[in-house]
Amino acid sequence: MAEYKLRVSQPVQAAINAATRLCAVYGSPIGHSASPAMHNAAFAALGLDWRYLAFEVDPKNLRTAIAGARAMNFAGLNLTVPHKLLAVEMVDELDGSAKKWGAVNTIKFQPEGVIGFNTDADAITQSLREDLKLEVRGAKVLLLGAGGAGRTAALKLAAENVAELFLVNRTQSKADEIATEIKTQFPSVKISVGYPKENLDLLLNATSLGLKVDDASPLDEKQFSLKQARAVYDMIYRPAETKLLAAAKTAGCKTANGLGMLLHQGAKAFEIWTGKPAPLDVMRRALEQNIYGH
């Protein structure tokens, strides 16, 4: 008779019970999310009777969905595309991080109200540093997208003193708004709306184009060639290699996807909810297993 051995790579969580605390991520779409794998592994590693879920929430139902989670005594929420800007008006209080970066990706439910945080901004630069060995101070950057993630990225890059920032968005008025804000807050940063002519240190995709197989590229290569970029970072992590990253690799660019950003924003959210240090190694392993299958 064949002998079978069960290999357990991470702690197994106890059965859900009436005392189990819940967290969740809301998005539309949400099927790609690896956040449940990351957070549930972290809860198990620390022996916490917590669970993390993922829900498809239409933007028109976001306020109701946040109120519902609070009513059911959830500990907190993460918000992904397209909810990060909408939620700014749906919380009782903005933490300093959410005020500074103008978007909410993490919510904590307190007895006194709903508190909105932003854990994306620091995660962006940390991931660029770790995954591309890139310091953004003094860099020339092309940023695609002016939604919640794009706005946060633009403000964070400006705060880190990039030399020059180029903003491109499908609706130009949104890019114009961010450019005006940056000119006011960070007058030393050179900022333009539209594609650059010169070579750059980094192209950063903060749009959701690439999540679906049949998505068009977020980049108009008639206006900007990937050969003009030294490195390309795509915030999308599933698929692990988007069409943009595949083309960038072919063009000789250094490339990285959004796994590192997901990890670091998630670790900070974990600490906000639980008050405990996040087990980064456990969370990274869970993400790699979930996204890459190893």
Image (tube, rainbow, N blue to C red):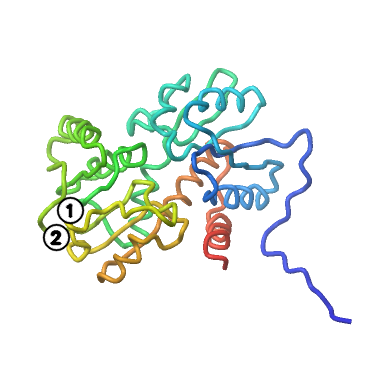
Count numbered badges in the picture. 2
Where is residue 142 drawn, in percent x and y? 21, 51
Q: Residue at x 48, y 26 (%)?
A: 60
Q: Where 215 falls versus 255 (above or below)?
A: above
Residue lying farthest bottom?
1
Where is residue 10 drawn, in percent x and y? 67, 60
Residue placed most toward the observer, 76 or 145: 145
Secondary structure category for the residue under label 1: strand
Q: Where 146 falls versus 110 (above or below)?
A: below
Q: Mark 1 = which residue?
A: 140
Secondary structure category for the residue under label 2: loop
Residue lying farthest front?
214
Where is residue 145 drawn, in percent x and y? 29, 43
Among the 4 quarters of the image, the one containing residue 51: top right
Q: Where 224 falls versus 153 (above or below)?
A: below
Give the label, 2 or 1, closer to the camera.
2
Q: Quadrant of the N terminus?
A: bottom right
Q: Mark 2 = which residue?
A: 199
Type of residue at label 1? Lys
Q: Where 206 falls versus 197 (above or below)?
A: above
Q: Residue at x 57, y 33 (%)?
A: 76
Q: Is residue 292 left or right of residue 220?
A: right
Q: Is residue 183 left or right of residue 244?
A: left
Q: Residue at x 53, y 62 (%)?
A: 288
- The numbered dot on residue 95 is none
Residue placed most toward the observer, 269 or 177: 177
Q: Residue at x 15, y 33 (%)?
A: 183
Type of residue at label 2? Asn
Sooner in the amino-acid sequence: mark 2 or mark 1: 1
Label 2 environment density (alpha carbons within 10 Å; few <14, some 14–19, many ≥20): some
Q: Are marks 2 and 1 in contact (CB under 8 Å)?
A: yes
